[in-house]
Amino acid sequence: MRKYSKPMMAVLGVLLMVTFLVGYSYQSGMGGTGDAFVLGRLHGQPLTKGKLTQARIDIRVLRNLPALADMGLYPMWLSQRSQTRAAVQFYLLLKEAQAAGFFPDIGDINLLVKQKTLRKQIGELLANNSNFAQPNVVQALEDLTTIDQLQVFIGGACRPSAPQLAHFVSELGTSVKVRYARMRASDTAGSMPTPGTAELQHLFAAYRTTLPWTADSPTRPPLINGHRYPFGYRYPDRVKIEFLKFNRDAVLTKLKPTLKDIQAAYAYYQANRDNFEITPPDTSTAPATAAKPQYKTFDQVRQKLLRRQLIKRVNQLFHRMLYQAGHIADKPWSTVDINGYHHAIPQAQWVSYRTLAADLGKQYGYTPEVGRWNHWLNASDLASLKGIGEATTQEAGLSQPLGLSVLAMKVHALDPHSKNIGLLLHLQVGYDGPVLTDSHGNMYLYRVIAVSKAHNPATLAQVRSAVMHDAKLLAAYRADIKAGRALAVVAGRIGLPAAAKKDHLAVFTPSSFKALENQLVGMTPDGQPQYQLAPGHLPGVQVRSTKLMQAAFFLAHQALGGTPSANTPAAAHGTAESKPSANGQSAAHLVLTHPCTSVALDAQLEVFVMQLVTAKPVPVNILHDPTDLAGVERYLMGHLNQRLLEQWFSYGAVTKRLGFVAND
C-alpha cells in the first residue's frame, strides 16, 4: 500500500470523478436543492419537484434535437408559460400513456436515430454538453415515443367519413374570383383631429403592458377589449452598439495586382479550366468527334481572376487586423467566471474603438471606419441597419448563420440563459462579439455598449407621441370601417369600379383562387417534387387573412345557393346573376357583378371592400376521385388533429383529466 499509494489514490480519484460526473449527467443538475418542494397534489398525494427530475431531463434533451420537429415528433404542445408547467405536463402525459398500455418500440427508436440530421444533433449534444450522457437521450426518446403512441391513437379517432370528405372537397374545392378596393388607416391618419387627453390615457392604459405587434410576428396581436389592434407601448429589449467596419471596396480600390497575383491567377485558371468552358453549339446531329470543348482564354477572364486574387489579399489583411484588434481589446478583460463569462469591468477601462482604429491604421496602412449608435435599438432596428444589419457570422459552433439582431439580444444581461447559443460563445456587454461579414465582403467587429431590459412605461408622458400616432390611426381606421360599409352598399347597386371611382380608390382584380392550394415543400429522395395542401390566399395581397378568405367564399356560397354559416360576414350587398350557356343549360360558374361586402382587419388597420366576380364549384367527378379525396383527407386529418391534440395535450386539459391540483 505504501509503495503504490499515490497511483492508487490517483486511480480512485478518477473513479470518483467519473462516478460523480455520470451521476450528474443522469440528473442534468436537476436534483438536489428543492427536490422535496411540493408543487401540488395528484389524486391526493403530493407531487414534489424531485419526481419531475426525469421529465425535466427529457425536455432539455428534446429541445436540443430540433430535427424531431421535421419528423412530427417534437412536443410542440409543451407549455411555454414556465419550465415547471412543461415538466408537470410531460410527466402527467407519460403517466397517462403508460396507464393506457402504450410503450416505446425500441425498433422504431433505432430507425429514428438512423436519420442523419438527428444522429448528428445527438452527437453534438453529447460532445458539447457534459450534462448529458447517452442514456439520457435514449430515455428521452423512449418517453417521447410513448406519449406519441397515445397521440397517434387519439388522432386516429377523428377520421372523417366519405360524405364528410366529399362535403369538405365541395366547400374548399370551389374557386372564386373577386375584385376589391382597400382603405389603409395610415393613408388618412394625418388628417384626423387631435385626440383628447382622456382618449390618449384610455389607449395607453389598454396597451401599456403590451409589446408593439409587427406583420412578421408568428402570432396574432393579443385580444384586448374585443379587438386585435397592433398597438403596444411596452419597451422591448434594446441595446446600444458600436463597431469597426472593415470596408473591402475601400482597400480594393488602392490595391494593384503584383506579379505574384498574376501568377496565382494563372495557376488557378490552369487548375480550373472546366469553369471557363464556352457553351458549345448544338451538335446533336453532328458526329461525336466534332463536339470538342472550347474554353475562354486567360486574357478573357484575367480581370475577373485578378479581382478574385485581390479580394483574397484583402481578406487576409482584414483577418490579420481583426486578430490584432481582438487581442488588444481583450487585454482589460482578464478574469472569467465558472460559466465562461468575463467579469464586468468599468466602461472607462474598455479599449476605445477610435483609438484602436487609429492604431490599426498606423500599423497596416488602412484605418477601419468607426460606427456608434447612441440611441436605443430593438431587434427590428438592428436588422434594418445598413451593412452591419444584414451581416452574419458562423463562428463559435453556431448551427446556422446568425446576425446582429439575434446576437445583440443574446448578451448575458438580457438573456441569462444564452450561454449555450454556440460552442464557447459568451456574449456580454462591453466584450467584443464574433466578427460579422456582409454580402459585400465587409467585416465588422462590434460590441454592445449598453442594454435596456424590456419594461413598461411608467407614465403616458414617456410614450405620448406614440400613443398620439396610434390614436389618430385608430380614428382613421374606424372612419374607414364606416366608409367601407357605405361603399359596399353603393357598389351593390352600381358595381365596385364605379363606386370606388367616386372615392378615388384603386380597384384590383387578381386571378381566381381556392381555399386550399398545393405548396411545394421539398423533394423526395428520388428527386420528385413533394407537395402539401395548405390554406389558400388572395393573390396580390400580402396579408394571409382568414377573414378575407371567409368573406370571398361567403359571397360564393350565397351565389351558389348555399346558406351562410355562423362565422361569415353579417351582410353582403347586391344580387347574383347566372349566364346561360349556348345550349340553354346553366353554366358551371356564375358571373356576378354586384354582390359586395366589407372586411375590416384589426391587425393591419385596413378595410377591404370586396365584390365577387365569378364562382366556380368543384366538378362532380372530383368528389368521387379516390386520389383527390386521399390528399384532402390527409390535410383534413392533419388540420383536425392539430386542433384536437392542442386541446387534448394542453396543460389545462391534462391536469384536469388526471386530477392534478397545483399549489399556485
Image: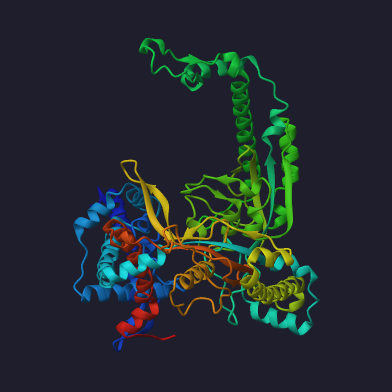
- Quadrant assignment, res 412: bottom right
In the rendered image of this protein, does residue 213 appear above or below residue 369?
Answer: below
Number of numbered discs present?
Answer: 0
Frontmost residue, 33 versus 518: 518
Q: How is the image coloured?
A: rainbow
* Residue at point 40%, 51% (across, down): 128
Residue found 50% across the figure and 70% down from its top = 550
- Position of 469 relative to 48 (above/below): above
Give the quarter of the image for residue 89: bottom left
Q: Percent x, y for residue 263?
A: 58, 14
Using the rendered image of the protein, determine whether residue 54 is visible from the camera's viewpoint. no
Going 28% across and 87% down the picture, which residue do you hit?
43
Which of 329 and 449 lies nearest the eye of the viewer?
A: 449
Identify the image quadrant of the C terminus: bottom left
User: Hey, which residue is sitting farthest front in the picture?
Assistant: 583
466 vs 90, left or right, is right
The reply to whether residue 653 is in sight is yes
Task: Tell me residue 345's x, y (percent).
Answer: 65, 57
Q: Nearer the viewer, residue 305 or 431?
A: 305
Q: Is residue 620 left or right of residue 253?
A: left
Q: Is residue 127 above or below residue 631?
A: above
Compare residues 633 and 403 and report the one nearer the observer: 633
> Where is residue 548 shown, x and y percent of the image?
54, 67
- Residue 53 image position (x, y, % from top left): 34, 71
